[in-house]
Image: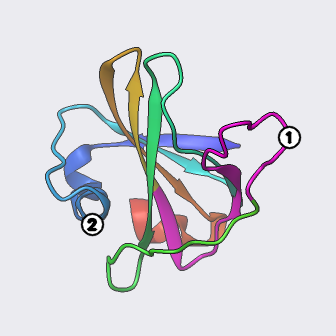
């Protein structure tokens, strides 16, 4: 897994496609990978919200299908792996121990140029 940092301003439209009121002075870390582990639930005061954004029209993708992890998931939380395609990115909003740590973007290797140009 490789990553780079970009200014929020350079990816603002992508982040705001997933989180309309998003703003930040922090840099946004862009991860290059082919899969993403969804763990969209609170655990110990921390949570990683995720939205799937279509790069062509900057709309969120509802109903993304993934195999829900059943082992070690007694409360049937949203836990599972999603394959990232070149058409979509995952925009993640990170809350760690109650603090807003900003945003991350997960992108397929062949679509990186669309993000960091």
Could you say where residue 26 lies in the image, as x and y percent from the top left? 26, 31
Q: Residue furthest front?
A: 75
Vertical position of residue 78 compared to residue 27: above or below: below
Residue drawn at (53%, 24%) of the image: 43
Residue with the mark numbered 1? 71
The image quadrant of residue 84 is bottom right
- Apparent side of residue 35 relative to residue 116 in the rendered image (left or right): right
Residue with the mark numbered 2? 17
Q: Main secondary structure of the magenta part?
A: loop
The image quadrant of residue 14 is bottom left
In the rendered structure, does residue 92 fall within the stretch colored magenta?
Answer: no
Could you say where residue 62 lies in the image, as x and y percent from the top left? 45, 74
The image quadrant of residue 104 is top left
Residue drawn at (71%, 43%) of the image: 1
The residue closer to the viewer here, 68 or 30, is 68
In the rendered structure, does residue 86 fall within the stretch colored magenta?
Answer: yes
In front of the other: label 2 or label 1? 1
């Amino acid at each position: 897994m490789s990553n780079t940092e970009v200014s929020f301003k350079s990816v603002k439209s992508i982040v705001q496609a997933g989180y309309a009121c998003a703003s930040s002075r922090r840099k946004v870390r862009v991860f290059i990978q082919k899969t993403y582990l969804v763990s969209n639930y609170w655990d110990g005061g921390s949570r990683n919200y995720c939205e799937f954004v279509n790069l062509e029209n900057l709309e969120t993708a509802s109903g993304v299908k993934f195999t829900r992890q059943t082992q070690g998931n007694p409360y049937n939380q949203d836990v599972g792996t999603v394959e990232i395609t070149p058409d979509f990115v995952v925009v993640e909003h990170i809350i760690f121990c109650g603090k807003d740590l900003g945003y991350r973007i997960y992108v397929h290797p062949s679509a990186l140029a669309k993000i960091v140009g």
